[in-house]
Image (cartoon, grey):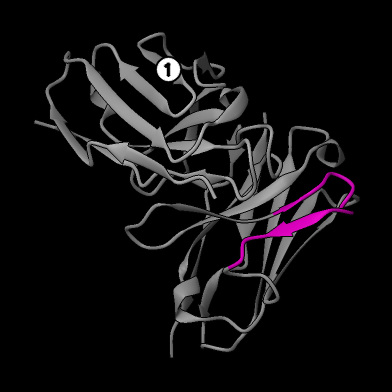
Amino acid sequence: EVQLLESGGGLEQPGGSLRLSCAASGFTFNNYAMSWVRQAPGKGLEWVSAISGNGVNTHYADSVKGRFTISRDNSKNTLYLKMNSLRAEDTAVYFCAKGPLTGDPYDYWGQGTLVTVSS
Amino acid sequence: EIVLTQSPGTLSLSPGERAPLSCRASQSVGRNYLAWYQQKPGQAPRLLIYGASIRATGIPERFSGSGSGTDFTLTISRLEPEDFAVYYCQQYVTSPQTFGQGTKVEIK
C-alpha cells in the first residue's frame, strides 16, 4: 500500500525558514518523480515544485522560485521542501504527491502538513 | 500557463441525481492530459479520472469523464451521500501544471 506522510509544518514568522519532509513507502521511491502541491485556507490547489526520480531535475512555481528548494534522499525514501524567506502568502497546507512535472497525474497524495506564516 | 475554468462554482443536488461538472481550458490540453480529483474537508485530493476519461483504480463506475481539446466534463451518474465534496480538474500536459478553482457539490 502506497503511503506518503508529511511532517515539519508549523507556525513561522515572516522571513523565517521551515523544512518539510515526506516519508514514502509502498513503492520503489527512486523510480518516481515527486511533487509538492499547496492549498491556502479555503482556496484551491497550487503546484509548488517537482523533482525527478534521481533528484537531478528540479522545477519550481514562479511564486516560490529562489526561496524554496526541493530535494530527496532515495536511501531514506524521503522527499523534502526547504522553505526560506517565508511570506504570509505561503500559509497553506502542503501536500506531497507522487507524480512528475508533466505527463502523469498525481495518483497518491499525503495527508498534508499546515504551514502558517504570521508574526 | 493554461488556465482552467470550472463551472458551476457550486452545484446543489439531491442524492440520486445526476451531476455534470464542466472544466474549460484557455488553450488545448493536448493528448487529453486532463485529470479530475475529489476532495473532502480535511482530506487530501483523490484521483478520480485521468486521460480525460480513464477511471483511476477503485473508482466507481458512476464517475465518468469526457471531452477533448478545451472542453471537459466529469459526470456523476447518480449521486451517493459520500459524493458530496469539492471536485478539481487539472491539466498535466504543460508546465506549470494547473488546477481549476473547483466545483462544490452540496446536498440540496
- The answer to whether A80 appears left or right of B10 in the picture is right
Left or right of B77 on screen, residue B52: right
Residue B102 image position (x, y, % from top left): 34, 42
Percent of width and height locating residue B63: 38, 16
Q: Quadrant of residue B65?
A: top left
> What residue is shown at x 29% (from left), y 36% (from top)?
B85
> Helix or strand or loop: what does disc 1 sit on?
strand
* Residue drawn at (62%, 70%) of the image: A64
Q: Find out whether residue A55 is within the magenta segment.
A: yes
Quick check: B106 left or right of A89? left
Q: Is residue A69 above or below residue A12?
A: above
Chain under numbered label 1: B
* Side (left or right) of B98 relative to A1: left
Please identify the dominant SS of the magenta region: loop
- Give the residue pinned by disc 1: B65
Q: Residue A27's spot in the image, x, y percent? A: 77, 32
Identify the magenta region.
A50-62
